[in-house]
Amino acid sequence: MAFVRYRQALVALILRDIKTRFFGSAWGYLLAVAWPLTHIAALMTIHTLAGRLPPYGDSGALWFATGIVPFMAFAYMSRMIMFGPVLNRPLLIFPTVKIMDILLARAIVETLSAGIVVIILAIYFTAAGVDFMPYDVPQAFFALGTAMLLGLGFGVINSVIAQAVPMWVTGYSLSIIIYWIASGVFFIPDNLPELARYILSFNPILQAVTWMRSAYYEGYGSLTLDKSYAVGVGVATLFFGLMLERFARGRLLQG
C-alpha cells in the first residue's frame, strides 16, 4: 500500500512537471522537447552550411549529431534537475513530498525527453536518406545512458548547492559553455597533442561524446576513450550527490 501511494505521488509530480514546463499545459511539454531539438538542428545546419567535410563518414549532419546529442542529454539533465527543488520548493510543505521525489520525477521526464529527441532525429535522418543506425547499437545506448547518468549526478549535486546558494544556478548554467567547448563535439580528441589529450580525457562528458561516436565510426577515439572512467565518474557523482542531499536535507528545509 505504501508503495502504491508513493508511485501515485511520483506520477503526480511527473505530470505536474510536464504541465508546468511551458504555458501550464501538457501541450507545452512539446516545447520542452522542441527546445533541445531546435538547438541540435540549428547547430547541425550552421556547420553543414559552412561546407565542412565530416572527418568521419559521409554525412556532416550525422557527424555533428553524434556529438551534440549526448552533450545535450547531459546538459539538459543536469540543469533541469538542478532547477527542480528551487522551482518546486512550495511542494515541500506537503509531508508526502520529498526533495528526492522531485529530483526523481525530473530525471524521469528528462530521460523521456531525450528518448523522444532521439526518435525524432532517427525519423529525420531516415527521411533524408541517411543511415542513422550505428554499427554498434548497444554501445550507442550505453554512451547516451552514461551521458544522462553524468547529468543526473551533476544535477543532484548542483540542486543541493543551488538551494543553499541561489546564484549557483546562474553560475552553473554559464559553465555549460566551458563544458561545451571542451567536450569534443567539434574536434577530434585523438588529433590533439598528447598532453592536451591527456588533460581533456579527464572530462567525463568528452568521454561520453567520444563513446557515442565510437559506436558510429569504427576506431574513433582509440587513444582517448575510457568507458570505465566515464561510468565511474557518473556513479561517483550520483553517490556523492545523494549523500550530500541526505546530509543537507534538514538544514535546507529549515532555511
Image (cartoon, grey):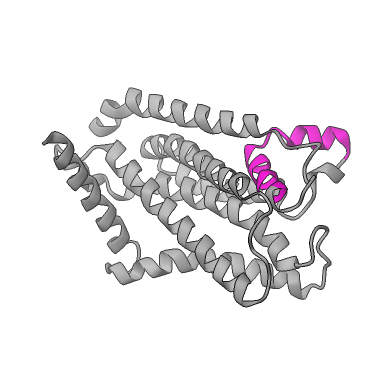
Query: In the current view of this chain or complex, which residue is farthest to the left?
Result: 1
Q: Magenta part mainly helix, strand or loop?
A: helix
Residue 173, x across and y down, in percent: 52, 50
Asked whether residue 152 appears in the rendered view, the answer is yes
9 falls in the magenta region: no
Asked if residue 183 shows in the view, the reply is no
Task: Write the residue at 54% across / 33% down.
Answer: 234
User: Which residue lies at the image location 66% right of the left edge and 66% below the top edge?
Assistant: 43
- Is residue 178 shown left or right of residue 4? right
Name the spot of residue 21 as percent of width and height, x first: 34, 62
Q: Position of residue 82 (x, y in %)?
A: 42, 44
| Residue 39 image position (x, y, % from top left) | 57, 65
Q: Is residue 79 left or right of residue 142?
A: left
Residue 86, placed above or below residue 31? above
Q: Is 212 a magenta residue?
A: yes
Q: Quadrant of residue 190?
A: top right
Q: Residue at x 79, y 66 (%)?
A: 58
> Magenta span covers which residues?
193-214
In this rendering, the answer to whether 83 lies above or below 246 is below
